[in-house]
Amino acid sequence: MTTFTPTTPSEVLSTVASAVAQESPLEIVGHGSKRGIGRPQQSEHTLDLSKLSGVTLYEPAELVLSAKAGTPLADIETLLAENGQQLAFEPMDYGPLLGGDAGKGTLGGVLAANLTGPRRLKAGAARDHVLGINVVSGRGEAFKSGGRVVKNVTGYDMSKLMANSWGTLAVFTDVTFKVLPAAETEVTLAIRGLLDDAAAAAMALALGSSAEVSSAAHLPERIAARVARGALGNEAATLLRVEGFGPSVAYRITALKTLLGKAGPLEEIDGETSRLIWRDVRDCRPFADNSEKPVWRVSMAPSQGHQMVLTLRMQAAVSAFYDWQGGLVWLRMEQGDPEAALLRGLLRKHGGGHATLVRAAPSHRAALPVFEPQPPALAALSARLKQEFDPKNILNPGRMA
């Protein structure tokens, strides 16, 4: 196996073009922080983008940032923080969950995996903030889409099409994102001791209010102790994050306390502890235990999440916690079996959704559909897109299906 480490977009183009000519599949990686997601790769060669790094444009006043695809996300976040800005969708760092180091993700990987975090309810995901891309397709052809301004119309929006493609359609060389000012103040209101059903009701009530809650999560008993270095203790915690200007945050927290006063004991958490809690929820830290116990990421209707988990627990040993008001359920299978058919069957019975196996032994990942199987019509559309962008199946073959 040969590893290619290009340092310029032209070198990426020549590498892919050569692979196409020789019909030699390529595994596409940045720093490898998400390498363990998807079916195991059996590519002949590796295209390592870690040397394709550096910010190419940053205009804080215009709220625009461009960087080469292999630029570490940690460097981007540091630069933005120095200017009081952020990627509002707060992309998840899969490194710790998959047994690696934190801070190894890349900007190209953010879009390729369409990453997001607890602020998804308010800010969306990576695809909602991308402005433009430069890529090399599986045909060995370079093209670009979008641009470097917020208001931009240049034809088909290929930028969003590439989101969540996991390197199977094209190789990013440069990515442009919209950035936003960081909140002046952040306060988390924690309701303690609620069971999953009561927590779902409390989160729904809070999100339906005028308090502009930016994030809502529920950490059941014992799960809560695994975030923020144990700052929450062992008791269940239902978390509501409020962000903005100081006086506005104080007013909205007071309104939430009045609204939820009868739900259970309330606790205000601010400053670095609040930020640490949401970072750990974002990165699935409660299950980042260096084990190979399968971990699933399940997206479904918020009102159905806790009901699905209750039904699942009657048939399998599982630990769970909830983000996105209960619409994102993180599951760890305690007996080691991924239980794919069981889980996806329960999803269908509870209104549908998507279940992705994000951590498991390679043998498990090779034996079942890691990503949610697509309906026939959508699968046919995906196959046509693959044929258009990568007809010889050169890029990350077999990773998604």
Image (cartoon, rainbow, N blue to C red):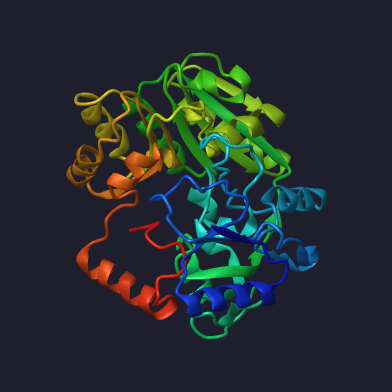
210 and 396: which one is in front?
396
Q: Residue 246, located in which quarter of the rendered image? A: top right
Provide residue 328's location: percent of width, then percent of height: 40, 42
Provide residue 53's location: percent of width, then percent of height: 73, 61
Compared to 273, does 85 lie above or below?
below
Provide residue 128's location: percent of width, then percent of height: 53, 63
309 and 100: which one is in front?
100
Farthest bottom residue? 155
Compared to 258, does 23 lie above or below?
below
Farthest top residue? 234
Kindly identify the residue that appears in the image at 71 percent across and 39 percent down: 185
Q: Is residue 148 visible?
A: no
Compared to 142, does 128 lie above or below?
above
Provide residue 145's location: percent of width, then percent of height: 57, 79
Counting labels gives 0
Kindly identify the residue that appears in the image at 81 percent across and 53 percent down: 83
Kindly identify the residue that appears in the image at 35 percent across and 32 percent down: 201
Q: Is residue 16 visible?
A: yes
254 and 200: which one is in front?
200
Viewport quadrant of the C terminus: bottom left
Left or right, residue 5 beside residue 93: right
Viewport quadrant of the N terminus: bottom right
Farthest right residue? 82
161 and 268: which one is in front?
161
Left or right, residue 40 beside residue 51: left
